[in-house]
Image: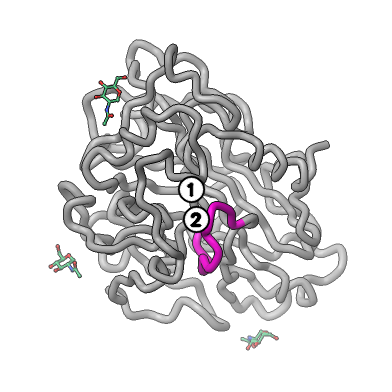
Amino acid sequence: MKTFATALALLTSVEAGLRFPCSTLTIQRLDPVVQPGSLPAAHVHHIVGGNAFNSTMTGDVGARATCTTCQMANDFSNYWTAVLYFKHPTNGSYHRVPVVPVQPLLGGSNGAQGGLTVYYTQFDLSKDNLKTQPVKSFQPGFRMTVGSPTKSGKPQTGLRYQCIQGSNRQFPELTDFPPKPCTGGIFTTHHFPACWDGVNLDSPDHQSHMYNTISSDGFTNAPACPSTHPVRMPQVTYETTWDTTKFNSLWPSGGPNPFVWSFEGTAAGTHADYMFGWKGDELQKAMNKSECFYDGCGSITKQAMTTANQCTVKDFVGEVTDGWLDKLPGQ
Ligand SMILES: *[C@@H]1O[C@H](CO)[C@@H](O)[C@H](O)[C@H]1NC(C)=O
Ligand SMILES: *[C@@H]1O[C@H](CO)[C@@H](O)[C@H](O)[C@H]1NC(C)=O
Ligand SMILES: *[C@@H]1O[C@H](CO)[C@@H](O)[C@H](O)[C@H]1NC(C)=O
């Protein structure tokens, strides 16, 4: 069984791909990919990244944004997921679960606030294999989603939950919310597909321009891209730590999982959205570089998280999403 300590040892000894934190940018009911123009959108999202974020986003996001909550200073992409809420087992009220930075904060990224950790891997975490498998950057205007709030049953491979006990992430990864309280919070992972059709920056379902290559959990190389989606892209992954600890005492012993996604969603509905926004060819330069990781792949400018944390967007929706709520916003 892989413990968090060995996972960390793996991370610090390897050199392939990008891994960096982005602080929380905003928590609002907006979704410029699935519901562009809707103000508000159907459910609350936790959003990180550049300040071009808005209810509608078109064109070259990286050229319009002026700051980002990400450590990589020229990454103006936006990354978001649904928000986790605690549903009080006896009185039915909801409370937003805070996000805390994914540990460990490596590569000079101390000071991240909330947020999530983003990966762009070329092959897997230990090698890049660029000679046989070059990776093409996403293009301006590109967006995609993974998972769906309407899904029932189990989430697809690559969308997973883990209990953090103390500071140890528990393996194997779960297809459902942990069945018992976790002393260190709940960890969620969203792996995106890696094969592009080479033409469309988006598609009606925001997924079919990509081919879902994910056949196993963890940071593994995806299988060969099919002829319909021949272009190998970076493998994007989000990791989020939800600090559920203050709700543990309100979870009756032996009772069912009291956590729901912001659409009153069960574990199957976990999903994530990606809006590409790297400036110029910065991501391509990084993906072309062999053997790089926390160093920004030799070419990317990093910023202090104290600077990243100053990047904000306005409150477009103007509704309360935190504290004890009678119902989930929009539900
Ligand atoms: C957000 O988008 C709206 C509609 O496109 C636009 O009018 C507004 O200026 C944008 N706001 C910001 C802060 O970018
Ligand atoms: C439900 O319980 C919480 C925590 O005890 C409390 O703060 C909240 O006000 C309660 N909600 C209702 C509707 O009584
Ligand atoms: C990345 O590498 C490809 C060849 O694999 C090359 O054509 C391209 O110009 C490189 N791009 C950058 C920005 O370095």
Q: Main secondary structure of the magenta part?
A: loop
Question: Whole-Å distance between the Cαs marked 1 and 2?
Answer: 6 Å
Task: Tell me residue 98's x, y (percent).
Answer: 58, 71
Q: Residue at x 56, y 50 (%)?
A: 239
Which residue range is magenta in the image? Answer: 105-116
111 magenta-colored: yes
Crowdedness of circle 2 by 10 Å Cα count: few (<14), some, many (20+)? many
Task: Tell me residue 162's x, y (percent).
Answer: 70, 49
Which quadrant of the rendered structure holds the C terminus?
bottom left
Is residue 331 visible to us here? yes
Q: Which residue is mark 2?
A: 21
Q: Is 264 positioned to the left or the right of 251 in the image?
A: left
| Residue 155, disc | none
Is residue 54 visible to us here? no
Task: Tell me residue 199's x, y (percent).
Answer: 22, 25
- Name which quarter of the figure residue 218 lies in: top right
Badge 2 element: strand
**Residue furthest out toward the right:** 253
Badge 1 element: strand
Crowdedness of circle 1 by 10 Å Cα count: few (<14), some, many (20+)? many
Q: Residue at x 45, y 58 (%)?
A: 22
Instruction: Tell whether circle 2 marks a residue whose Cβ is less than 8 angstroms from ligand 1.
Output: no
Which quadrant of the rendered structure holds the N terminus?
top right
- Name which quarter of the figure residue 37 lies in: bottom left
Q: Which residue is mark 1?
A: 118
